[in-house]
Image: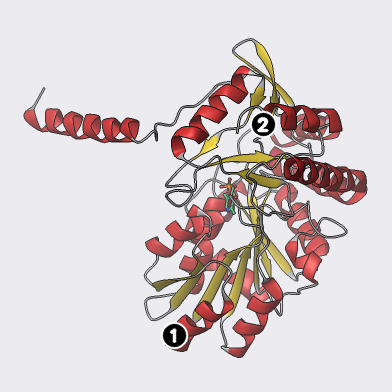
Amino acid sequence: MCPHQADINDAVKKHIKALAQNNLVRTRHAHDTPQGPVIRLKGKNIVNFCSNDYLGLANHPALISAMKDGVDRYGVGSGASQLVCGYTTAHEILEERLCEFTGRQSAIIFSSGYLANLAIVNTLLDRHDTILGDKLNHASMIDAAKLSRARFKRYRHTDINSLQNLLKDSTGNKLVMTDGVFSMDGNIAPLPELAITCAGKNAWLAVDDAHGFGVLGEHGGGTAEQFGLTAKEIPVLMATFGKALGTSGAFIAGDKEVVDLFVQSARTLIYSTALPPALAYTTIQALKIVCEEKWRREHLRKLIGRFINGANQLNLPIINSPTAIQPLLPGSTVKTVDASTRLLEKGFYVTAIRPPTVPKGTSRLRITLTAAHSEEQVDQLLDALSLLV
Ligand SMILES: *Cc1c(COP(=O)(O)O)cnc(C)c1O
């Protein structure tokens, strides 16, 4: 082995040792069941309270058969990027349905939300421009901003004054980026106020609604629908298929000119293989179920209320969230990891979320509820939590 290789190995070992000392080593647990309220891990059935499958669609029978049908029609892989020969009628129809569903003129599909966020920043801004992001934005938006040539400023979490101050001395085109529902806290961004602020300062607003889309709003249109905000207020609307819709991928919707520009110059669209057509085909069906099976949103809302009431009665250290994301902060990283481990022993799966995913000192159990859970399962989780924290 050359000495250089040994140096690298030493550096890696040191890095991992530091992680271990801070209780920050992450592990993956392979399970062998479909996503759902109960999954089997190492031969044991456990109740799963950490997936983003908010409506319980990832294993929906109609979606399973749509996927099989999609594979029969289109095969497995897309074969190329959308601009070469990877774009199919399944992608095209899904884009049309997304337009109808979101009330936008145009929509474009990306292979993942991460790639869609990279596209937003790199397509719309150059080095003369400024990105303003909420402090607690999802990592993909932060990375997008860091990888862009634009200036990047972060305003205090949901703080309109802080944003206004930063906007005052921002130059070039200005893009304000926020989660619709914050992924680790579950709270909802003040979108109407953000929209007014952006309009007043001639800034664009981009909303990443990964955790609102399908779940919030009367028809599942997400935070934009909940607040009644159109493309005029939110010119760039992004959401993903891997959460409430139960499939995988993402889209950006807006006015035709805006979306057309992504076709021309979004590097993560042009230089990345298109989403497998069967997935686009399945997502068309998922969107239909989001519209038709309203009971899923209603049941989820009931479970959220039940969990919050129960947690408050037990004085559990949850933070105030109106959504399916219910963070519980045991007080330290050690306590959080310990609580997660003991929950697993009792048959509940809730992963510990630690820095850098969340700010230092705020390690948490990110409990997520889904429409596939029962009231009994929520009560059982509350019982287990009451004995732990
Ligand atoms: C999950 C998530 C993403 C990334 O989406 P993928 O399709 O999983 O890449 C982006 N933004 C937010 C807020 C998310 O929660």
Q: Which color scheme is applied?
A: secondary structure
Mark 1 = which residue? 172
Q: Quadrant of the N terminus?
A: top left
> Which residue is found at the position 45% from the left and 33% from the top?
334
Mark 1 beta carbon near ligand 1 (under 8 Å): no
Q: Is residue 326 left or right of residue 226?
A: left
Give the SS element for disc 1: loop
The residue located at (77%, 39%) in the rendering is 370
Residue 210 is situated, as x and y percent measured from the top left of the image, at 65, 53
Front residue of this view, candidates 168 and 61: 168
Instruction: Tell me the kind of residue under disc 2.
Output: Leu
Left or right? Give the position of 54 relative to 291. left
Report which quarter residue 244 is drawn in: top right
The tag on residue 358 is none
Ligand 1 within 8 Å, label 2 CB: no
Q: Residue at x 78, y 36 (%)?
A: 56
**Above or below: residue 332 compared with residue 259:** above
Can residue 312 be seen here? yes
Is residue 296 shown above or below 125? above
Indicate the secondary structure of the residue bearing disc 2.
Answer: helix
Mark 2 vs mark 1: in front: 2
Which of the marked residues, 2 or 1, is nearer the chain's N terminus? Answer: 1
One can see residue 255 in this view: no
Please state which of residues 143 and 275 is positioned toward the viewer in this rendering: 143
In the rendered image, the quadrant that contains the C terminus is top right
From the viewer's perspective, is 239 left or right of 283?
left
- Name of the residue lying farthest toward the top: 43
- Relative placement, left or right, of 165 versus 70 is left
* Cα gap from disc 2 to disc 1, whole angstroms: 50 Å
Q: Position of residue 193 (x, y in %)?
A: 67, 78
Relative to 86, say whether 150 is above or below.
below
**Disc number for residue 385:** 2
